[in-house]
Image: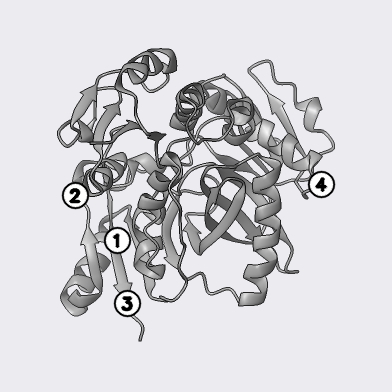
Amino acid sequence: MKKLAIIGANEFQNRLILKAKELGYETHVFAWEDGAVGKETADYFYPINIVEKEKILEICKKIKPVGVCSIASDLAVITVNYVAEKLGLPCNQTMYSSIQTNKYEMRRALTDAGIDCPKFVKVDNEFNSEIIKNFRFPIIVKPTDRSGSRCVTMLETIAGIEEAVAAACEVSFEKAAIIEEFIDGDEYSMETITQNGIHHYLATTKKYTTGAPHFIETGHEEPSGLSEEIINEAKGIVFKALTALHIENSAGHSEFKIDKSGNIRIIEIGARMGGDCIGSDLVYLSTGNDFTKMVIDVAVGAGIEPICDINNSASIYFLFDNEDIAKMNDTLNDFPDLVYSVSEINYDIIGKATDSSTRAGYYICIQKRK
């Protein structure tokens, strides 16, 4: 049986473990034991923190996996690239891991490639507001190396900047933050898979958030509602950005905004599937493309064949408060055939969301089109 090394074992990563087993792989999973849902489903589980890439590599040298992969963690991307490259397996080159996972380094790489970016600067706890005296407000402050809307803050004026920077630096792995001018407009993401440097389009997602100041995602929808002309324009920009970031063998999740004038501007890009069930559920439900399987196929060097002959509507709605739960229950009662799945709901954190990890739950709806 062919062996597959999987980095990460939380609830979302468990989708990858189950898919690998379905495809006949023997799964060897590496993750911190706390919250490791995949511990119970993996064939072999190793309680090793995913950042301990040297330890994981030594075990993988003995296991001899045919591929190394993960689906929705920027942190895991670094280890995937490191281990796979050392083993001579398909991956993105480790020398480019920083521009694929660090928001500041990413902005620099995109700017160098001639891609339009807002004014930005990297800061730490020694921050001096003089460094942004020429910035146009509003501005966004966020950690350079975290995801899930953690400590993202929009500021209309300089007031509160020290607190926002301190909070972002506190949760950052490198204790740094990026400050950038706010990009206005409706938010979308493009889901792609890249193999041997060739980018393949899968879907475009409309994204909904709480808005300022923290922009926590409240829901996602596919298809996005954008015209084919605009999608093709966005595709050109996204593909150029993926190439600039040296994304050669992995999934891609590219967030962008379209302003009132129709300008398309990149927010940030992940060399991974989109979280929030975008990659694991919405892409498959709306297009028929098995994104999770494609991630595995790329990791082991198997061919991929994206399809584009299915056009269903798929949406995810996140639960923040009792009103959201009431809407979900109404949908379940009135339109039960539309509800594809409902997550477990954590009633203890209702009304207490501070980022994506503290939402109470979600439900997914699908409407099949003829």
Cα distance in 3D space between marks 1 and 4: 42 Å
> SS of the residue at dot 3?
strand
Marks 3 and 1, how far apart in space? Answer: 20 Å
Distance of mark 4 from mark 2, alpha carbons?
44 Å
Q: Which residue, given by chain and number where applicable, does mark 1 sit on?
A: 324
What's the distance in space between the residues labelled 3 and 4, CA to CA?
40 Å
> Considering the image in quadrants, where does the C terminus appear?
bottom left
Hey, what amino acid is under mark 1? Answer: Asp
* Three-letter amino acid code of the residue under disc 4: Gly
Query: Given this view, does label 3 or label 2 mark the residue nearer the observer?
Result: 3
Q: Find residue 118 and report its horizontal and vertical position in percent.
A: 75, 45
Q: Which residue in the protein does label 3 denote?
A: 367
Task: Give the residue displayed 27% in from the left and 68% down from the top.
Answer: 327
172 relative position to 365: left or right: right
> Depth-wise, is mark 1 or mark 4 nearer the camera?
4
Provide the residue designation for mark 4.
114
Q: Earlier in the sequence, mark 4 or mark 2?
A: 4
